[in-house]
Amino acid sequence: MNMERLIAGLDVGSAKTTAIIAEVEGDLPRHPSIKILGVGQVKTTGVHQGMVSDIEETTRSIKKAMQDAERMAGIEAEEVFCGIAGEHAQAMISKGIVAVSHDEIDKSDVDRVNEVARAQAIPQDRELLHAIPQEYTVDRNTGIRDPIGMSGTRLETEMYLVTIGTSPPIHLRRSVERAGYKMRELVLEPLASALAVLTEDEKELGVALVEVGASVTDLAIFHEGKIRHLGTIPFGGRNVTRDIVHGLGVTQADAERLKERYGCAYEPLIDPGEVIQLPSTGAQGERHIPRELLAHIIHQRLDEVFDLVQQDLSSAGFNGKLSAGVVLTGGAASMIGVVELASEVFGTGVRVGVPSDHLSGLIEAVNSPRFATAVGLAQYGANRVALGGVTSARRLPLGKGMEGIAAKVKFWLQDFF
């Protein structure tokens, strides 16, 4: 096996840490397929609201998940493509303009205009994660995807820059390094999930990816093939569990179990006569409740979460513009009734996003929406390998300005968002 073609994706979530080891297959630079060799998933300790709050504990979770995946794959990984939560990310549009040097636009002009757009002053306390070109303008002609070969005197670009506060990446890198791995690259989680579950047609027509995590719900909107908006709602599966704890008087662990076994996100789906037994202490005696009550608690909270997502979507100006509807991923997306509830709130077609395209190997091990981010990270890594982007694994200088950014791989050449 060619070790150069081996990738590890690591998703350190607030509830679970997931590691995937895969091999890049085929030489398609745009969408190489990956063969899943190993998967590890453990309960995360040490991460709060998508941020590392305890480096020792996070290191332990990373080590365990990676070792489980390595054992299954029979291979040890050295580097990881690691996801970072969307909560601390900010996006901005940056413009670049250059004069065209020859009769027709060539790659050097495109590189120059992208460099100008990327050289936007990034604040001292933030780090550039992704620089994604959205479209080009040649003289007065707008909306051009690829200007190479066109004639014109002036070339403009609009670039989507995603930055993140510097301390979350520092703590995450430290945890990964302490676990014995090199951080190959940091990738924004909703963008990784989009790689795993969205089709090119959906991105073209307009689609919202809604990822319901444990502590946050991420929104990523794609339109005309490009990422257009990122949003985060500070509620997720944990809030649902908390409501069950308070509403039914059960422990956190029992609330999780009830949610997994009997949970339903859409009340009308439940037979009003159905009764479930609650876990109880000796003093409480045996307790039974209508399953409808559990569904009611979950329905109310998720309805509120989806409502907030819908408000964000509207204020971003995409209401009614998403012809491909909504794709749900994350742990909560596998619950019964979640599609029905989301369809009602968003008023559009909804499907659950499960990683499936460009995959071989242990596909059934990742056949669930909660693996979207980890599979997407491995696919992101595969794109890097297929494009020959074997990046150096050295730490980036933390100084901002061009030195820190230039040390990164040239993002726009590997433009797959």
Image (tube, rainbow, N blue to C red):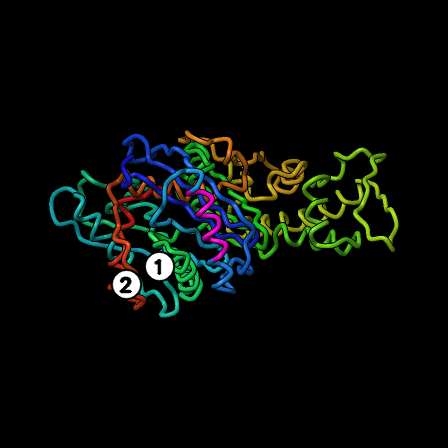
User: Which circle marks residue 16 in the picture?
Assistant: none
Q: Is residue 66 magenta?
A: yes
Task: Compare marks 2 and 1 and give the one earlier in the sequence.
Answer: 1
Instruction: Check disc 1 and report the residue beneath it.
Output: 128
Residue 36 can be seen in this image: yes
- Residue 130 visible? The answer is no
Q: Is residue 62 left or right of residue 302?
A: left
Q: Is residue 369 magenta?
A: no
From the viewer's perspective, tell me whether residue 103 is left or right of residue 39. Answer: left
Question: Foreground residue, 395 or 89?
Answer: 395
In which quadrant is the N terminus drawn? Answer: top left
**Residue drawn at x 47%, y 49% as measured from the top left:** 11
Packing grade of label 1 (10 A; few <14, some 14-19, many >=20) is many
State the image coordinates of residue 199 (x, y, percent, origin top left).
44, 33
Q: Which residues are magenta?
A: 60-70
Q: Amino acid at mark 1?
A: Leu
**What's the mark number on residue 404?**
2
- Residue located 76% across and 36% down the image: 268
Instruction: Determine whether label 2 and label 1 are within 8 Å by CB.
Output: yes
Amino acid on which the number 2 mark rests in the picture: Gly
Q: Is residue 328 above or below residue 301?
A: above
